[in-house]
Amino acid sequence: MLIREFAQDNQQNQATKLASLATLLSDRADDTNSQKQISQAAFIEAAKSLGVNLTPETLNDAISQEPLSNILEPLDPASGVVRFKGNTETETGMSVDQAHAVVDSNAKKALKRRQ
């Protein structure tokens, strides 16, 4: 195997790791109904924990190339955050606490009917 083939495989491997990280973080934001964004520093630290050498300077280049360009919004250097695609405010019907309260009251009503 030639050294350039090894280097190319390594770059593809790092891009795959970054895409997996971005997908995981985006899905987690969906699950928790939180904002679909993360600070640049936190994203870089998470990438480094996966063994990807990412710096603030190389972050913009990585986001502009596939597969990250399909997952992340273009980087705004002034904002200091990395935004995931679909970063729109969604209106939720009720908060988690409200949902728990509704379930609790319905359970109490059902229990009273059984007795």
Image (spheres, helix red, strand yellow):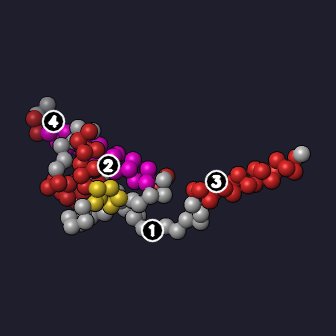
Amino acid bearing label 4: Phe
**Pointer 3 residue:** 100
Residue at the extreme top of the image, as rendered: 1
Q: Nearer the viewer, mark 1 or mark 2?
A: 1
Amino acid bearing label 2: Ala
Asked if the residue under mark 2 is in contact with the one under mark 3, i.e. CB atoms within 8 Å, the reply is: no
Real-space Cα separation, disc 3 to disc 2, in angstroms: 35 Å
Q: Secondary structure at mark 2?
A: helix
Real-space Cα separation, disc 3 to disc 1, in angstroms: 23 Å
Mark 1 nearby-residue class (10 Å; few <14, some 14–19, many ≥20): few
Q: Secondary structure at mark 3?
A: helix
Q: Is residue 18 magenta?
A: yes
Query: Going by the image, does 24 lie left or right of 82?
Result: right
Amino acid bearing label 1: Glu
In primary-sequence order, the first of circles 3 and 4 is 4
In primary-sequence order, the first of circles 4 and 2 is 4
| Residue 78 figure quarter | bottom left
- Residue at (62%, 59%) from the top-left corner? 98
Q: Nearer the viewer, mark 3 or mark 1?
A: 3
Real-space Cα separation, disc 4 to disc 1, in angstroms: 43 Å
| Residue 40 figure quarter | bottom left
Q: Find residue 103 and report its horizontal and vertical position in percent.
A: 69, 53
Q: Find residue 110 and report its horizontal and vertical position in percent.
A: 81, 51
**Pointer 2 residue:** 19
**Pointer 4 residue:** 6
**Pointer 1 residue:** 89
Q: Secondary structure at mark 4?
A: helix
Amino acid bearing label 3: His
Q: Which residues are magenta?
A: 5-29
